Image (cartoon, grey):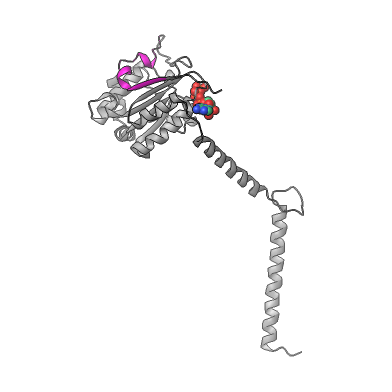
Amino acid sequence: MQFTEDTLNLMGLREVKKMRFFTLGIAVATYRNSGTKGYSSKPSYGFYTKYKNKDKTTTEKKQRRTKIPWTEEQKSVLSAVAQGSSVFITGSAGTGKTELLMEVVKLLRKLHTRSKVFVTSSTGVSSFAIKGQTLHSFIGVYDANNCSPENLLDMIMGKKRAISRWEKAGALVIDEISMVDAKLFDGLEFVARKLKGVDETWGGIQLVVAGDFCQLPPVNQNSKYVSYAFEADCWNDSFDFQIELTKIFR
Ligand SMILES: Nc1ncnc2c1ncn2[C@@H]1O[C@H](COP(=O)(O)OP(=O)(O)OP(=O)(O)O)[C@@H](O)[C@H]1O
């Protein structure tokens, strides 16, 4: 049989098509088996369903977060923060301190820009809950409990990144303040004033502090007597507004 050039091209094309169907067949088989144990005639939508559900929960969370009906007490905190005031928020467990703090952080980021707002907590777990860092990692000194303000400043002076955090800070959030002792609180105020180079309380940093002094007390292994942050010399000068949330949600 004599093949013309056209016939050969046509056969070549058919071979290519056959190959494509073969490859497609393998792909379909692999897809059907993926995510399932053994063969299943139904395609696996596992990934898609998981992705869809994840997306749904994120949207639900977002909607829930924006729809919180803030109480008058909580609103008064938000309006004080919006005016640039330094605020202390207290209240027993379940009064919405953390929830409110998350909203306060959003507000502070609008006021000062994101990079100038430092969100901290005295414990690792709660710093994770508010998507921040531990207070000690922000300070740049991990064993700062028994230092005098001057010693604390000396220790920080050796750390470039810590200095730059302090210099940059426009707002500082501290959650779980009950675990910070008075000496450290006074020390931090001194450091802020010196590193910001502004002779105002906390060097002009807008401070938002939350916690319940009836919960965990400060930990100080080197001293028998623990003094709470509210006993610090600078405590009253540190805030323009102090409030106790009274409505319990859980
Ligand atoms: N205004 C509000 N309306 C409805 N629910 C709220 C309101 N404020 C807070 N909540 C809800 O109340 C619950 C407790 O809030 P949150 O965890 O912030 O309390 P908390 O004071 O930080 O408690 P804890 O001291 O135990 O950490 C959360 O589920 C939160 O979403």
Q: Is residue 52 above or below residue 105?
A: below
Residue 205 drawn at (x, y percent):
31, 29
Residue in view at x 47 percent, y 31 percent: 130
Asked whether, in this view, residue 35 is left or right of residue 80, the answer is right
Q: Looking at the rendering, in which quadrant would you find the C terminus?
A: top right
Question: Which residues make up the magenta segment?
Answer: 225-243
Between 244 and 17, the one lying in front of the other is: 244
Q: Is residue 140 visible?
A: no
Q: Position of residue 173 (x, y in %)?
A: 39, 28
Nearer to us in this view, 131 or 34: 131
Q: Is residue 191 left or right of residue 127?
A: left
Q: Position of residue 162 (x, y in %)?
A: 33, 32
Seen at 40% across and 26% down, the residue is 76
The quadrant the N terminus occupies is bottom right
Q: Quadrant of residue 90?
A: top left
Q: Is residue 242 magenta?
A: yes
The answer to which quarter of the image holds residue 85 is top left
Q: Quadrant of residue 186?
A: top left
Is 71 left or right of 160, judged from the image as shown?
A: right
| Image: 26 above or below 163 | below
Give the residue displayed 37% in from the left and 19% down from the top: 145
Residue 97 percent across, percent down from the top left:
47, 25
Name the residue at 70% across, 85% down. Answer: 7
- Taking depth in this image into account, of 146 and 124 the one nearest to the observer is 124
Residue 93 visible at all = yes
